[in-house]
Image (spheres, helix red, strand yellow):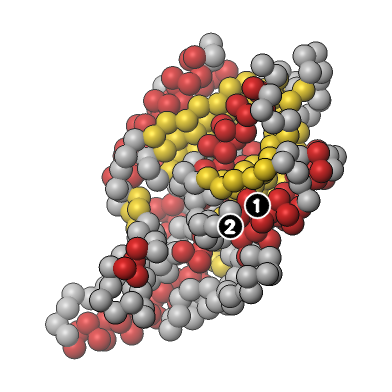
Amino acid sequence: MHRVIISGMGIEIPESSISNEELVESFNLWVGQENQQREREGLEPLSFSSASFIEHASGIRSRHVHTPKGILDPDRMAPYIPARDDDDLSVTAEFGAKAGRKALLDARVPPGEVDMVICAGSHLQRLYPAIAIEIQKELGTGGAAFDMSLGCSSAVAGLHVAYHLVRSGAHRRVLVITPELITAHLNFRDRQTHFIFGDAATALLVEAIEEGDERPGRFEVVDTRSWTQFSNNIRSNFSYLNRAAQEDTSSVPAEGNLIKQQGNKVFKEVTVAGHRFIVDFLAEHGHTPESMRRFWLHQANARMNAMILKLSFGGVDVGHDRAPMVLDRLGNTAAAGAIVALYENHKDMKAGDHGLLCAFGAGYSIGGALLRMM
């Protein structure tokens, strides 16, 4: 079995940003128009949103978006991303490849020396050809490639697979790419979810090193773990079967098929499961939460992360230095969020410091990676 390191990291954050205030203005304009119609039909009015409600509920103040056009238009409330020809590079492959190039540059590894690409994301653009194979072609990497998805745990699940492929010697270098263009799948007219998500792409290069080799400033992957348990509380029904369920196959309704969740249930159940996962996984390696220099957790909800850590630390509050947050300015970037937190918050760590990368997602799913700074 080989030792395994993360030799390179890359992130791609879109330039465009939408504040809570801008999002709420658009949402409330639509609600006002909709309520006029609902009043005429004798239906209960929809509730307005507010920037203060969003920040209190989630900790989010703004989010970066791949394509802002159309999102704030009350008559559309969805990004306008024109279709591309089949022979053109797809939108998500382009997004992911940008992060992938940065990871290769960070590792100083030529693309041809990578023998596997895993595209691990919560919202992949299509079923086939695999986005990973398209990224492989775009970057010029060798070997093989495949897609995988496990909700917001996808990136850590991809790292879990890459770690074992490299550790066993099946592959020498694996590039795990997570292009999360999630605003295109978001229902901006759903008060429970319209404010949650933003877009980001990340990449990790995972490779083997010889015994005794040290790479200062890089992370050795000590171990990884994955856990799942079925739940309907976070769900997307968007599928090719949507068309088959309609008598009129010329149109497919978005309502009910896009992202939906039962927020209170998710908060309670994931908090308990996340805490238990962290404590048990660390204990397997003789660690406690206190022995971790840093936690890079899934960037979904600031209050949920604070509660998970407080439970894990025996009632003690944990601050930004120990568990950095990026969702206040980026929103929930799905599987990319924990990797962005890792990328932006690791250079101050010292040799021998340990940290835990951990993400929670639909499924339910939880993924973890115990890392040691070299």
Residue at position x 49%, y 41% from top? 153
State the image quarter where residue 311 is shown.
Answer: top left
Relative placement, left or right, of 26 versus 140 is left
Quadrant location of the N terminus in the rendered image: top right
x, y (%) of residue 171? 69, 31
The residue under label 1 is which amino acid type?
Ile
Depth order, front residue of 168/296: 168
Where does label 1 land, which residue?
Answer: 133
Residue at position x 31%, y 65% from top? 256
x, y (%) of residue 69? 58, 77
The residue under label 2 is which amino acid type?
Pro
Looking at the image, residue 192 lies above or below residue 42:
above
x, y (%) of residue 162? 62, 33
Where does label 2 land, which residue?
Answer: 129
Q: Label 2: how many residues lie within 10 Å, few (<14), some (14-19) or many (20+)?
A: few
Q: Label 1: how many residues lie within 10 Å, few (<14), some (14-19) or many (20+)?
A: many
> Is the Cβ of the residue at disc 2 closer than 8 Å to that at disc 1?
yes
